[in-house]
Image: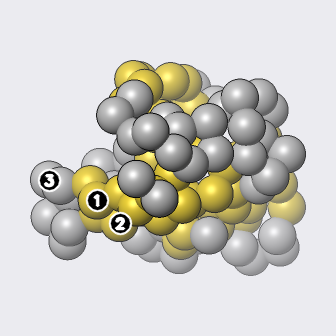
């Protein structure tokens, strides 16, 4: 799980290969990204500038961003350096470095 800077949205990652955005005031699902990865999504992190990072058992980290005026996040890029499932993600406080944890 990851909470937006203003606390208004909660992001969840799931074994069903989706990540979802929930409105915290009533826990209504605002967005569901089905098929975001080819395997379970194990980790999620948010940057201050609105990028969403998802780490998966498919050994990739995907970067997502919601464009101005759009309702859904779109894929920005896919990072493919791990040789095993990505299990953890963390951003530095300034958002300039993304750390990832895997079994490799």
Mark 3–mark 2 Cα distance, whole angstroms, equals 11 Å
Residue 60 is left or right of residue 39, and the answer is left
Task: Say which quarter of the image contains residue 72.
Answer: top right
> What residue sits right under mark 2 in the picture?
90
> What residue sits right under mark 1 in the picture?
99
- Are circles 3 and 2 on residues that touch, CB within 8 Å? no
Q: Position of residue 89 (x, y in %)?
A: 42, 61
Residue 7 is left or right of residue 91, and the answer is right
* Crowdedness near tag 2: few (<14), some (14–19) or many (≥20) residues, C-alpha within 10 Å: some
Instruction: Point out the tag, 3 or 2, that comes first from the N-terminus.
Output: 2
| Residue 68 visible here | no
Task: Please determine whether, in this image, residue 87 is positioned above or below residue 93.
Answer: above
> What residue sits right under mark 3 in the picture?
96
**Disc 1 element:** strand
Task: Please determine whether, in this image, residue 40 is positioned above or below residue 98.
Answer: above
Marks 3 and 2: which is nearer the front? 2
């Amino acid at each position: 799980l990851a909470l937006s800077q203003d606390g208004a949205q909660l992001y969840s990652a799931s074994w069903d290969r989706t990540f979802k955005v929930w409105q915290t005031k009533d826990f209504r699902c605002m967005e569901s990204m089905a098929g975001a990865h080819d395997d379970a999504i194990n980790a999620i992190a948010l940057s201050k500038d609105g990028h969403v990072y998802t780490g998966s058992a498919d050994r990739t980290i995907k970067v997502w961003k919601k464009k101005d005026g759009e309702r859904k996040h779109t894929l920005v890029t896919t990072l493919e350096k791990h040789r095993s499932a990505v299990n953890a993600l963390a951003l530095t406080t300034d958002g300039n470095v993304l750390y990832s944890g895997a079994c490799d």
